[in-house]
Image (spheres, grey):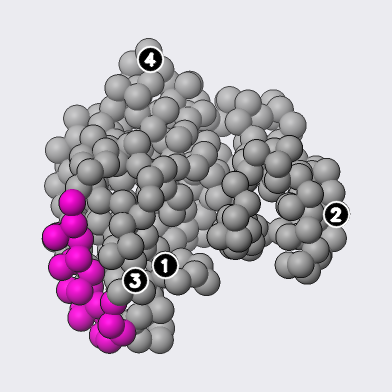
Amino acid sequence: MIVTGCSRRKKASINPLLHPGNLIAGGVSDVAMQWTALITSAPRTHRAASLYAGRSFTDAVWSAQAAHLPHIIVSAGLGLVEAEQEIPAYALTTVGATDENVLSKCPLGTRPVDWWRAAFPNAPLKSIIAQAPGRVHLALSKTYLEMIFEDLQQLEESSLQKLRIFTGADKTLKWSRFESNILPYDARLDGPDSPLPGTRSDFASRALRHFTTLTLGQPEADLAEDRALVERALYSMRPPVLPKRERRSDEEIRGELIAVWAAMKGNRQRMLRHLRDTLLISCEQSRFARIARELEGEGLR
């Protein structure tokens, strides 16, 4: 089984009713009840695997299909979703300075895990993992790991032995009972010898895809053997040499994106790499995504 996060990017137009802007601010339980009412009454017209966009999600789908494994999606808006399940086109997140962040409707200090507990108190992650017949590949970012951490804490020892965790947020699980379940992927996956270089935001799904290629057609192995397999695969890879990048204002970054938008057909991954690798401009993923969304809202396509 593969368990990954959803994506804020969608391939279909969002149902305007399914947006945190329609919620009345209040206690996290009250806001969660409002959201549940909206989602429950919304038409479900999109297959989950076909709705979400972006490299991180695409790599996760590739891994699930290549390995012929069930794919479970962790969604801050819908809970646990099967890839083949029909879902509505919604807009909700628990991270970032965006109007899609539902935590802006909740009391100050509300955490993603608080939202998850209030909105999806019966999310069956424990039973799903317990019933999985083989490895459970968990590829999640820091935010998603923290959001479902309490669910993971409920796992029995037999389930723990099946768990393979792919993440760039190792510190989140430092000193926890899951530390040894993290497969030893590191910065070498971003280096010059990596077959799957990318950004930190898609690190978990790239690590999952790399592991999937290593294990395709191979017999099931235990956790120690899987860790050793990854260590051998990374042994000869070099870490990236990080260039010195300059900090620029939002307006300067907007100008650079506008200059290449047409030539790169609005491809976000190419434009971010252009900023970072060609122009040597420092730009965080979330900041880049915000500026790109603003430009799209102004008519750039």
Q: CA distance from mark 1 to mark 3?
A: 6 Å
Image quadrant where residue 36 sits: bottom left
Look at the numbered disc 1 and give the secondary structure of its residue: loop
* Residue labelled with disc 2: 244
Do callouts 4 and 3 mark residues in contact (Cβ within 8 Å)? no
Label 3 is placed on what type of residue?
Answer: Pro
Q: Is residue 20 visible?
A: yes
Along the line of sight, which residue is nearer the eye, 284 or 35?
35
From the viewer's side, name the closer residue of 26 and 112: 26
Please report contact status of discs 1 and 3: CB closer than 8 Å, yes or no: yes
Tell me the amino acid under the disc marked 1. Glu
The answer to which of marks 3 and 2 sits earlier in the sequence is 3
Range covered by the magenta-colored residues? 23-43
Name the residue tied to disc 4: 218
The circle on residue 100 is: 1
**Marks 2 and 1: in contact by CB < 8 Å?**
no
